[in-house]
Every structure is written in structure tokens, then in C-alpha cells.
Amino acid sequence: MAGLYYEQLEVGRTFQHEIRRTVTEMDNVMFNAMTYNPAPIHIDAEYGRSYRVFGQRFFNRSFTLGLVVGVSVGETTLGTTVGNLGFDEVRFPAPLFHGDTVRSETEVISRRESASRPNAGIVVFEHRGYNQKNVLIARIRRSALMMKQPVA
């Protein structure tokens, strides 16, 4: 499904994204290697086992953010976004562990006309990610500049 235009993104509309993703140790290690993050809580199994809070390694939160938002693109902004304007109120109430299965949902929180671009509007999305136990692992508010429908 292609992304939606500004006019199609009504406030309150919620998308339950069908794509789910089981995350692996390789995902975690590769993400940290590609972003040069050497934090042992993400890549060192022995350190993770001795970690008093969770007793195991957990995912880099930037990976969690990217996955939860990325899953939404096909149904919301693919081909219809001018660009992301920013991420606000990014929260990770619970960690993401190897073997967890992530599902995401997106809600349109607000929208307004762009003051500088008559062919676009600003939409605020809230993306929420959950693990297989339905525990909230991420809540992200994102502002995007969205194209308006072309005039025929």
C-alpha cells in the first residue's frame, strides 16, 4: 500500500501494522557494529549475564526506534512524505531482548496546514511498539511534512 496524503491522515486514525519482526542477536550485534556503539550491555554476553537490572543483553534503543517507526512507512508515508521534521517524546518503557517479536501501531495525533508550503501539511504521528507479551517497548512522537493530494 502506498503512503497516504495529508488529507487522508485524519486525527485519531490508528494503523495496526501487519508486519511483525522477531529480532535476533545478529540484528543487535550488527546494528551496534554499524553504528560504532561498543556498549557491553548490547554486545557482551558475559557482561549481560552479570547485569543486575535485566540479567541479559538488550537491544540498542536506537534500533528499537528505527524498527517501530520503519514498520509504519508502507502504510503511512511511503512516497507521500516530504521529510521528517523531528522526533519528540521518545520513550522506552521496557527493553527489547533477543528473540522478542515486535509489533507496531501508529496513531495520527494532530495535523495542520504548512505555513510555508501550500502543497503540504504537518502531521504528528505517535508510533507504539509492543513485544509478544503486549508490553509497550517504545512510544515515539514524530512530526512529518506530508504532501497534499495532487489537484486533478
Image: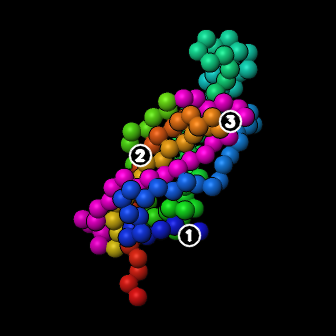
Contact (Cβ within 8 Å) of mark 2 with mark 1: no
Residue at 64% over, 27% down: 58
- Look at the numbered disc 1 and give the secondary structure of its residue: loop
Q: Secondary structure at mark 2?
A: strand
Q: Which residues are magenta?
A: 94-118
In the picture provided, is 25 more to the left or to the right than 36? right
Q: Residue furthest left?
A: 115
* Residue at the spot 47% in from the left edge and 68% down from the top edge: 4
Q: Which residue is denoted by mark 2 in the rendering?
A: 141
Q: Nearer the viewer, mark 3 or mark 1?
A: 3
Q: Is residue 95 in sight in this rendering? A: yes
**Quadrant holding the C terminus:** bottom left
- Which label's residue is closer to the chain start, 2 or 1? 1
Mark 3 or mark 1: name the one nearer the start of the chain.
Answer: 1
24 on left or right of 79:
right
Q: Amino acid at mark 3?
A: Asp
- Mark 2 / mark 3, whichever is N-terminal: 3
* Mark 1 closeness class: few <14, some 14–19, many ≥20 residues within 10 Å: few
The image's mark for residue 2 is 1
Q: Is residue 146 visible?
A: no
Marks 2/1: CA distance? Answer: 21 Å
Q: How many labels sit on residues?
A: 3
Distance from disc 3 to disc 1, alpha carbons, whole Å, reads 28 Å
Question: What's the residue at 59%, 37% (across, down)?
Answer: 134
